[in-house]
Amino acid sequence: DGGITQSPKYLFRKEGQNVTLSCEQNLNHDAMYWYRQDPGQGLRLIYYSQIVNDFQKGDIAEGYSVSREKKESFPLTVTSAQKNPTAFYLCASSPLPGRISYGYTFGSGTRLTVV
Amino acid sequence: AQSVTQPDIHITVSEGASLELRCNYSYGATPYLFWYVQSPGQGLQLLLKYFSGDTLVQGIKGFEAEFKRSQSSFNLRKPSVHWSDAAEYFCAVAPRGGSYIPTFGRGTSLIVHP
């Protein structure tokens, strides 16, 4: 079955450490997205990519970095510059925007905790 | 500025009762409209979407939503709630152009009493 795989499910980060969250999709979707979810705040967009080797900042990109070297993969690095990284991170993908099939497919998330 | 409002943070219903979750949006033109559901510790699952045509949209799990242009609303309904419907529900709107990036509401937590 096609879908999005996020790993790991739980991740612990020490102060000053960079960590990378994995997101892989086999849906042949062109666009991929990273969201951060905090209690009571809904979903906030970190980065998105609509084509390989290109990505755009979202609303809260500071302290995060991404790459899109392959259509299937969109890893997110939480850098030491992100001062409050504890959150639930969701990856999503969609067909090209504007298509009738447009709509997001989400992964099951990674819970990141600073220790 | 574009915005999505889900005015109810929590909704409590009894199993078997009807349900309506509210969603209002502020956009320059009619956007694409979505409802998603999230179980604890999981990702979001698309329940239904409205692009055009019939303003009453049927989705999965017995849910439906009605788009009302005059009220800028897209409320989610279910005639009879099951205990397994307890979850977080998110309304989202996306512009019909540009980046098409959706804006999500803050969510409504549904609690179902037996």
Image (spheres, coloured by chain):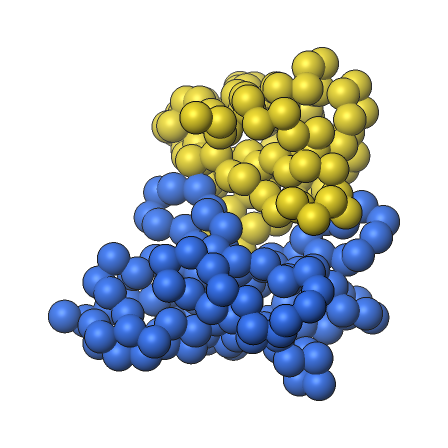
The relative height of residue A93 versus residue B77 in the rendered view (above or below) is above
The relative height of residue B109 versus residue B46 in the rendered view (above or below) is below
Q: From this viewpoint, is residue B86 visible?
A: yes
Left or right for B15, reference A73: left
Q: From this viewpoint, is residue A13 visible?
A: no
The residue most toward the bottom is B70
Q: Residue B112 falls in which quadrant of the image?
A: bottom left
Image quarter hosting the N terminus of chain B: bottom right
The relative height of residue B24 versus residue A108 in the rendered view (above or below) is below
The relative height of residue B100 versus residue A53 in the rendered view (above or below) is below
Of A84 and B89, nearer the camera is B89
Of B43 and B57, nearer the camera is B57
- Number of callouts: 0
- Give the residue at x 68% y 37%: A95
- State the image coordinates of residue B48 (x, y, percent, origin top left): 52, 58
Colour in which the image shows chain A = yellow
- State the image coordinates of residue B92 (x, y, percent, origin top left): 60, 59
- Give the residue at x 64% y 38%: A94
Q: Residue B9 falls in which quadrant of the image?
A: bottom left
- Give the residue at x 42% y 65%: B63
Colour in which the image shows chain B = blue
The residue most toward the front is B54
- State the image coordinates of residue B18 (x, y, percent, origin top left): 32, 79
Of A68 and B64, nearer the camera is B64
Left or right for A14, reference A31: left
- State the image coordinates of residue A54 (x, y, percent, origin top left): 80, 25
Image quarter hosting the C terminus of chain B: bottom left
Left or right for A82, reference B70: left
The residue most toward the top is A69
- Give the residue at x 76% y 32%: A50
